[in-house]
């Protein structure tokens, strides 16, 4: 069973996008580029979602 978690090995800020990339089997760099492109028109709403996800998602070394 796959679990969504913050990546401890593939992280830049908090590991949210690295963990999401591992969960979806997608390159985390691609997710980071998409995140940055969507961050501009979202008026920082996406940044708030990222911060909330960083607090809610468990760390990867827990499993």
Image: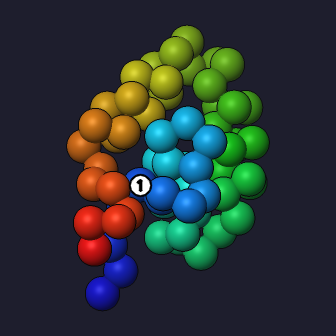
Q: Is residue 22 left or right of residue 27?
A: left
20 or 46: nearer the eye? 20
Disc 1 secondary structure class = loop
Note whether residue 20 is visible. no
Q: Residue at x 73, y 53 (%)?
A: 29
Residue 18 figure quarter? bottom right
Q: Is residue 53 left or right of residue 21?
A: left
> From what the image shows, is residue 50 above or below residue 19?
above
> From what the image shows, is residue 40 above or below residue 21?
above
Quarter occupied by the C terminus: bottom left
Q: Residue furthest bottom?
A: 1
Q: Is residue 21 left or right of residue 59?
A: right
Instruction: Point out residue 13 in the picture as x, y percentages from the top left corner.
Output: 55, 36
3 or 63: nearer the eye? 63
Residue identifier under label 1: 6
Q: Is residue 3 left or right of residue 31?
A: left
> From what the image shows, is residue 30 above or below residue 23?
above
Give neighbour class at mark 1: few <14, some 14-19, many 20+ (Cα, 10 Å): many
Instruction: Point out residue 45 in the picture as x, y percentages from the top left corner.
Output: 46, 20
Q: Residue at x 74, y 54 (%)?
A: 30
Q: Residue furthest top?
A: 43
Instruction: Point out residue 48 in the picture as x, y percentages from the top left corner.
Output: 40, 22
Q: Residue at x 73, y 32 (%)?
A: 37
Quarter occupied by the N terminus: bottom left
Residue 60 figure quarter? bottom left
Instruction: Point out residue 49 in the picture as x, y percentages from the top left corner.
Output: 39, 31
């Amino acid at each position: 069973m796959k679990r969504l978690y913050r990546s401890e090995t593939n992280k830049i800020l908090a590991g949210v996008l690295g963990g999401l990339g591992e969960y979806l089997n997608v390159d985390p760099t691609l997710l980071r580029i998409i995140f940055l492109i969507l961050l501009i028109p979202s008026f920082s709403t996406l940044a708030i979602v990222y911060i909330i996800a960083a607090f809610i998602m468990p760390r990867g070394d827990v499993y």
